[in-house]
Image (cartoon, rainbow, N blue to C red):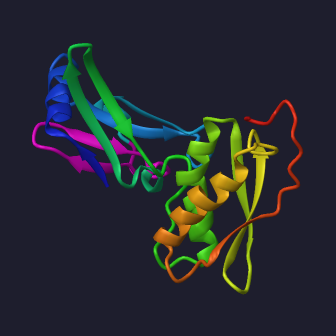
Amino acid sequence: MITISETAQAHFVKLLSQQAEGTSIRVFVVNPGTASAECGVSYCPADAVEEDDIKIPFEHFSAYIDADSKPFLEEAEIDFTTDQMGSQLTLKAPNAKLKKVSDDAPLFDRVDYFLKTEVNPQLASHGGECTLMEITEDGYAVLQFGGGCNGCSQIDVTVKDGIETQLLSTMAGEIKGVRDMTEHERGEHSYY
């Protein structure tokens, strides 16, 4: 479920040694499954452990996860790195904003998940986004673009060389291509 690197474990042991005996850590997601999802780590005193919490034992401490956060913390990683700029604890939770779909989920759900987790974060840097509208009977993913993507002069490159190439690679044999149904109107919102 959650991977905590050895350096992060050592960091937690050091922090926990300064807390009351029996204190563990809690890993959680605030607003799970939404665009405003935030992951965090906090101290978890022994009297704060809930009956339905999931306990993950490590050699010198335990981590607790509330039941609601569990599906959003699948494949999460916590690391602690030190370099010339200082030390940093990082928590990566790729499923925090959107619950991961299974490999045997319907094609629409898998493509939608891919767009929301892989494509939209890239488009967001330009103020854009895309939404899966349908998958045609002949295997084309039909997308609607918004924000900075609407009217962008590079939209054809984004669709064909970016999204379509990634989808064909990831879902080979299931998707034949990508179509853009957006009526692009250039304006101040457009990225280029």
Q: Position of residue 114 (x, y in %)?
A: 55, 61
The magenta region covers 50-69
- The residue shown at (13%, 30%) is 10
Q: Residue furthest bottom?
A: 137
Residue 89 to residue 120: above or below: above
In which quadrant is the N terminus drawn?
bottom left
The answer to which of 161 and 59 lies nearer the viewer is 161
Q: Residue 58 lies in magenta, yes or no?
A: yes
Question: Is residue 88 toward the left or the right of residue 143 in the image?
Answer: left
Total marks in image: 0
The answer to which of 24 and 156 lies nearer the viewer is 156
Residue 21 to residue 130: above or below: above
- The residue shown at (18%, 16%) is 18
Query: Does residue 35 show up?
Result: no
Q: Position of residue 90 (x, y in %)?
A: 33, 31
Q: Position of residue 3 (x, y in %)?
A: 26, 47
Residue 74 to residue 46: above or below: below
Q: Residue furthest top?
A: 85
